[in-house]
Amino acid sequence: MNSALPLVLAGPILRHCDQDNFTLWIVTSEPLNSLTLMLAERKISPLEGAQRQCFALGERAFQYLIHVNEPQLNKVGEAISYQLIDSQHGALFDHVEQLTYTPQHQPHFVVKTEIDQLLHGSCRNAHHHSGDALVAADTLLAQDTAPSARPALLMLSGDQVYVDDIAGPMLYAIGKTIELLGLRDEQFQQTALTHSKQISYHPAAMYQRHKKLLPRTEYPAATGLVRWYINHPIFTSSIAENHLTSLAEIIALYLLNWSPELWQQIDIPKQVNGLSKANTLRWQREWTHLLEFKAGLTQVRRLMAHLPTYMIFDDHDITDDWNLTAKWEQAAYGHPFSKRIIGNALIGYTLFQGLGNQPSRFAAEITPQLQQFLDKPDEAMHDQLIDNLLEFNHWHYTLDTSPKLVVLDTRTQRWRSESNLAKPSGLMDWEALMEFQQQLVGQDKVIIVSAAPIFGVKMIEAVQRTATFFGASLLVDAENWMAHPGTANTLLSIFQHRKTPQQFVILSGDVHYSFAYDIGIRFRSMSPKIYQITCSGIKNQFPEKLLPIFDKFNGWLYGHFSPLNFFTKRKRMSIRGRRPNGYRSQRLINRSGIGLVKLDANGAPNQITVLHADMSQTDFKPPRTA
């Protein structure tokens, strides 16, 4: 079996790269030997200590994070080729198919300290029927590989994987990947299964985890009328039938999301036995969509091998409604099995996403323990690692670019409701917001990355607020920046503070549709200029028939001149929606895509575009002046 596997299973993916840092992520089927890094004409050999971190994911899966940190390591504005050479296997990337852009023979990258353009997006669901916009981004890069035409970075702002929404054929592939790579088993507590080896990946066992495996609890949620609403399952996703549980499943999911090679090792049947008629049809639909997803993975890998890629989590990277309310936290972390499920997803995020953003932030508290656990898995050590990750408070980060890029953690530093634990928590607490404000002081321009839009569609927020009043916040994902008074007022005060920047660009996703706002402060002559650009999803969409209704009602009730705006928390903010392709009344676009933002010298966007999977574009035109 080992001889059939290629040496490079996934990657290379460029992570944190600037003047002083080069970071590269790969997964191989064998442990590597002495490694040499070639950066253009420079040879760094051998890679030692923190320069090469190896994480043993399984018997035939080894993750390597290559991180070289030296002053003035990379020249700015020039194409820099790279190659990783193993003393036994030679140049690792020479045998990776379709990895480079013509006419280059090696992958390369460009360091830009001035962000003149970037790509951003979120929400990539492998089995969604829409196209994969990362493929379109790769096609765009292939058209012009000159350093001046290259985006400075790729920012993935949440839901890079859907741990809680797994297609039946994907779960089948996950089971095969666990077997193929020898990914490790684990023990479970307080569940019907005592060991992950007992999990069945036969199609007849699909679509039943929400009934037979996932933990459940019951608690009343106080509402504005009466304490009547009972939420039974801890994992509240409406499509949790195949919710992942074990760490091996999480690892396999990530590899299948980024690796074309693994799909070549797996034959997923289209016709299966043991499913109901409805689930048989569902399996076949998902099978078709996954084939389309698989077909684009070679291009996705090429894109991520050439652009420094940064990531931050949102809910589906861990589970739907992750930390949405304090009551949910009590139920989820108070049950050993649900805590293990959440913890496994967080370990997966750390390995496949978090570490590469800025490896030094994890060096003291997390990386040694993570390596020790993976080298010799132990149940007590497993639980301790999860506890440490749940307490870790450095998921957020900044990039020393111009404009400065500030990536927010809106999931683990929640401002919990004091009046009712079942009400939505604020996306960041007071201490986190104060730290955020300190990052802004002294900056004249800044790019903020928030998984959820800071300024949302008010009509949809009103629906969420109504559902919260009746105790159903978990059913409608009632999490937005305005849902919690403390968070909302503190955040808006930061924007209105006279020492914060005069130029804000906010990048967000999460909502599965795209829109852009121009925002100012009412009644102030020298108002900061705020631009919010929401692009979602890369491979996902909002329910097609519902969004146009919300769009129209939002325009009627909360348009720029509507007096209803003065009854909202953001009443001091003037918000103008940009027109997609110049349409007069439409503001929301419901097509999968990835955002392309171009900035002028003062940090203001001079082009806001969504690039769709079929290479068509939506351009958000500035609001009318009259």
Image (cartoon, rainbow, N blue to C red):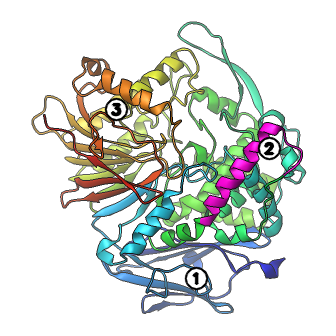
Asked if the residue under mark 3 is in contact with the one under mark 1, i.e. CB atoms within 8 Å, the reply is no
User: Which picture quadrant has residue 20?
Assistant: bottom left
Q: Which residue is drawn at 35% across and 67% down?
A: 152
Q: Helix, strand or loop at disc 1?
A: loop
Q: Is 193 placed left or right of 591 in the picture?
A: right
Q: Earlier in the sequence, mark 1 or mark 3?
A: 1
In this figure, what is the number of numbered marks?
Answer: 3
Q: Main secondary structure of the magenta part?
A: helix
**Quick check: can you spot residue 247?**
yes
Answer whether residue 167 is visible to the viewer in this image: no
- Disc 2 versus disc 1: distance between alpha carbons? 51 Å
- In the picture as drawn, the residue positioned furthest to the left comes out as 525
Question: Of the numbered discs in the image, which one, if any, rests on residue 48?
Answer: 1
Q: Name the residue under label 2.
A: 280
Instruction: Please state, as top left, top right, bottom left or bottom right, where the C terminus lies in the image.
Output: top left
* Tag 3 near tag 2, CB within 8 Å: no
Within-10-Å neighbours for mark 3: few <14, some 14–19, many 20+: some
Amino acid type of the residue tagged 1 in the rendering:
Glu
Front: mark 1 or 3: 3
Vertical arrangement, residue 51 with respect to residue 56, above or below: below
Residue 270, image x and y in percent?
A: 78, 55
Q: Name the residue under label 3.
A: 490
Q: Residue at x 67, y 64 (%)?
A: 255
* Disc 2: CA contacts within 10 A as few (<14), some (14-19) or many (>=20): some
The amino acid at mark 2 is Thr
Kind of residue at disc 3: Thr
Q: Give the range drawn in magenta.
A: 272-295
